[in-house]
Amino acid sequence: MGFFGFFSKEKKETLDKGLQKTKESVFGKLARAVAGKSKVDDEVLDNLEEVLITSDVGVETTLKIIERIEQRVAQDKYMNTSELNSILRAEISALLIENNTNDVDDFEAPLKSKPYVIMVVGVNGVGKTTTIGKIAYQFKKAGKKVYLGAADTFRAAAIEQLQIWGERVGVPVVKQQMGSDPASVAYDTLSSAVSNDADVVIIDTAGRLHNKIGLMNELTKIKNVMKKVVPDAPQEVLLVLDGSTGQNAFEQAKQFTKATEVTAMAVTKLDGTAKGGVVIGISDQFKIPVKYIGLGEGMEDLQVFRRDEFVDSLFGSKE
């Protein structure tokens, strides 16, 4: 089942529930923005700009959306405020299509290479290890043989947490002592994975941002060592961001994209926050596909990001 495969009722309900607070916040603000207005004028557009910025869509992306709506208003001469919802939906959908150009596969889809190596980056506390565990679970459920590598060797808790997830999911975790060379752990993990005919390898890395040069050198070294075992590894560098931190997630994305070549993003903790608009802004500003979104604590609550379903959950299904 690939990207265009069946999106189950259960997944849709999880998505709707996870984005509920964002939806209520955005549309509550939107209703106030157009209160007493019959047509879209400069005041409505100014209010809409404030709605989007305070919904963590980000300034640059907001200005882009407003500019597009202004162009439509200029073309149509007169636009009813009741149309604003569908117009906003169309422009956000268009942005997500532009910036998520890569086809995002379901876990059941054939892998592009074997083993498919995912190096996971992100600061501590964003749900990085939990995300790794959930991805491993989904791949294993889809019949893939998965190996995990505990290359965040700077915190004993990180190694232990990954080990716990490995036991929960039922996949092997390759680890060394705290303080060991992270690149050595990555090398051992890939060697073991190749020897045992694994399909997917997920490597955890340290989440430190205090020294960008050190981070860059460390991630580059891990990549170079992995290539000695699997020449085209890593096939994916996944940046995990905490959606509930709003604008702070933008800053983290900026720092990590400077430190290494990020190819995909996972935005976690979208349930229980009204900051789901951050997915739109991050996707637009960094031109990197959002691959996964986290919508709860359960194993099944990490979903492949599907832009159409995401927009449907925010704005309601098209009639």
Image: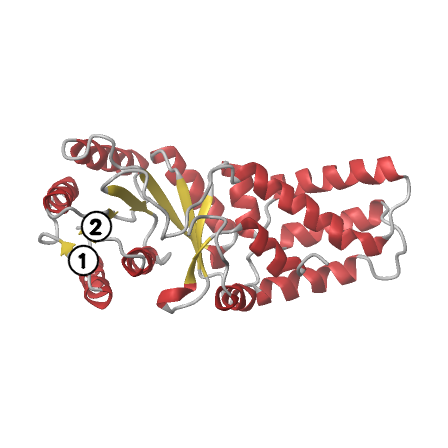
Callout 2 environment at 10 Å: few (<14), some (14 to 19), or many (20+)? many
- Quadrant housing residue 316: bottom right
- Quadrant housing residue 135: bottom left
Q: Which mark is residue 115?
A: none
Across and down, in percent, residue 156 comes to 17, 59
- The reply to whether callout 2 and callout 1 are in contact (CB within 8 Å) is yes
Across and down, in percent, residue 91 comes to 68, 44
* Residue drawn at (51%, 51%) of the image: 306
* Residue drawn at (19%, 52%) of the image: 147
Label 2 secondary element: loop
Label 1 secondary element: helix
Above-or-below relation of 225 to 266: above
Above-or-below relation of 287 to 87: above
Q: Quadrant of the C terminus?
A: bottom right
Query: Would you name the residue on which mark 2 appears?
Result: 152
Query: Would you name the residue on which mark 1 appears?
Result: 159
Q: Amino acid at mark 2?
A: Asp
- Quadrant housing residue 171: bottom left
Residue 30 lies left or right of residue 190; in this view the side is right
> Is residue 204 in view from this perspective?
no
- Specify which label sits upstream in the sequence, 2 or 1: 2
Above-or-below relation of 127 to 149: below
Nearest the eye: 30 or 314:
314
